[in-house]
Structure formats: structure tokens, C-alpha cells
Amino acid sequence: MAHMTVQEAIDQALQEEMARDPSVILMGEGVATKRRHLVDAFGEERVRNTPLAEGIIAGTAVGAAATGLRPVIDLLFAPFLTLAMDELVNSAGKLRYLSGGQFSFPLVVIAMTGAGWCVGAQHNHNVEAWFAHAPGLKVVMPSCIDDFKGLLKAAIRDDNPVLFFVDIGLVYSTADLSEDLPDMSVGQAAVRRSGEDVTLISYAKTGGVCEQAAQSLASQGISAEVVDLRTLSPLDEKTIVASVRKTGRAVIVHEASRSCGVGAEVAAILAEHAHGALRAPVVRIAGPDVPAPASYPLEQAFVPQVDAVVGAARRLMG
């Protein structure tokens, strides 16, 4: 195992995929400046800085993907994706279907999201549910270092456009990266901890919150199972439903706004497919429906915390 940051694991995935497949190119705002080692390894043709023009970057990537390349574009902060909605939603997401399968659009969009850097509302907005709602797009949001590397590699190899969201709060966290990672697939959740009494369902940084909550609950005699969604579109309904059918209780946790969020979709899936097994109502813990603050104390209050998850699970247990 090698100890490194999540950012270093992402760079490692990019380097390995660019070495494996000459059709993989990297474009974006400052990518050649920040990742000079990739320029040295693969040349300026394959690693390119771009103007600060998200729509143009995304549109170029769609065209490149249609002509046989596998572009990876870095648009920095998730709110900037609003400037590329037409290119990503109306072109990348729909043209494979509209062409009757004659074209594929294997592109990856990397964007940072969430609290952790106090960058304020214009740079911090969890928009993953918008893209999970868009037909033709896949959405990935990892929580651990192995998944940042393994799922980015899987996203690059996928023949569909993939939004790869990087939780800002995890970018420079450090952990041991497994040396022999198995090939991963987009669309598979992971059971991080087995339990019998309640299922905690989450993704990105709140996955770690749920693992900490499960440890606290164990000390109180409550056995919590932790499910990390990893991919938000497509959702791994089989794993979600199987876990809640076993435990009979569910707490869904995410930092994004509560209204119309991923948690609402998961709750609906459980209502449709696990209703008979539920021993208590499904509970959602999410960020407030307000713009993200820039103040550090307010930003931390914005994000679901361990105590809130523990309290919800205890209430479900009666």
C-alpha cells in the first residue's frame, strides 16, 4: 500500500489510463499547469490548458468523443457546470440515443463540490442530483481513496458521458491506496459495514460520517449497516433494497439539499421495493435548502454531522 492524498490517487488514475489508451486526452482550466508531470509524460497535444469557458470546453469534449477520442475535462468547481448544461445535458447525454447508437460519447467531467474550503455559494453547490436526473449521463461521487482511483479509471473506460464529482472536503485527505485494485464498474454500491438493526445510506464525505455514526451506535448496542452508493446514476437498487430488507430501518444522509435530492429517490425506491420489510419510516438527513455559507462554523453546520445520524438511528430503534 502507498500512503497518499485523494488528489494524488486521481492523478495516478489519469496517468495510468493515458498510458494504457492513447485516445485519452485531458483538457481544462489549468490542467497542464497543475499536472505538469502529465504534460512531460504525454505531451502538450494530450494535456491542454483551456480558456475559462466551460461551455466551450464541454462542447469541444463532446465533439472529440464523437470522433473517437476519450476526453477528460476538469471544470474545477461544480457550480461552473451551469455554464455547460446545454453541451452536457442536450448533447453528451442525448446524442448517442438520437443517433440510434451510431455514435458514443466516452467523456468524463471532473468537478469539485461540497463544503470544506469555505469558498462560498458561487463555488460550493452540490448539483449531483441535477445530472442524475438527466437521461444518458452517469454520475459518480466516491468517498474513499481506492474508489477515487478505481472509479475514475472505470469512468474513463465507459462509453457514456460520466460526471465525476470530487468532494472538496476529501481532496487532500490522506489514506493508504491499495496496490492491486480490482477493476471497478460504474453503478455498484458498496457495503462498508455489515449490520442488523438499521441501514445508513450515503455517499462522498457523509459516507465517513455514517461510518463514524455506526461505530458510536455499536457502543450503544445498535448494529448499523453502512451502504456507500458511490454511483448516483445508475443507482444500485439491488444493494440498497437488500440491506434495508435485512435491517428494516433506513437513514439516508447527504450534504446536498434535501428537496428533490438523491435521498428522496432512494426513499422512493425503498417505499416501492422494501415497504413490507420496513419497521419504521425512512429518515433523510441532508443539507438545508439554502446557498452554502462561506463562514467555516456555518459551513460545518451545513453538513450532516455524526450526532444527527446517531440520533436519527436511535429514534428509529424506539
Image (cartoon, rainbow, N blue to C red):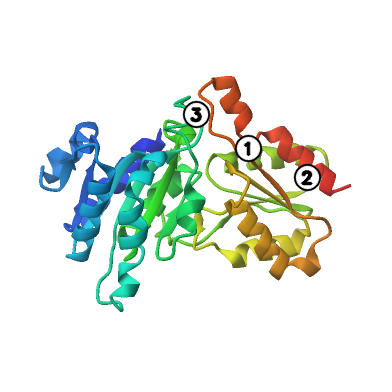
Q: Nearer the viewer, mark 2 or mark 1?
A: 1
- Crowding near the residue tagged with mark 3, few <14, some 14–19, many ≥20 C-alpha atoms within 10 Å: some
What x and y, as percent, mark residue 247?
76, 58
Can residue 267 be seen here? yes
Q: Tag 2, which secondary structure?
A: helix
The image shows residue 76, relative to residue 24, as above or below, that is: above
Q: Tag 1, which secondary structure?
A: loop
Q: Mark 3 highlights which residue?
A: 116
The image shows residue 131, relative to residue 205, as above or below, that is: below
Q: Mark 1 highlights which residue?
A: 288
Q: Which mark is residue 313?
A: 2
Spatial distance from mark 2 to mark 1, Cα to Cα? 20 Å
User: Taking 66 as reference, is 132 left or right?
Assistant: right
What x and y, as percent, mark residue 2?
39, 38
Spatial distance from mark 3 to mark 1, Cα to Cα? 16 Å
- Residue type indicated by callout 3: Gly
Residue at image x 34%, y 73%? 97
Spatial distance from mark 3 to mark 2, Cα to Cα? 26 Å
- Residue type indicated by callout 1: Pro
What x and y, as percent, mark residue 271?
72, 65
Please state which of residues 58 and 233 is positioned toward the viewer in this rendering.
Answer: 58
Please state which of residues 168 and 299 is positioned toward the viewer in this rendering.
Answer: 299
Please state which of residues 75 and 189 is positioned toward the viewer in this rendering.
Answer: 75
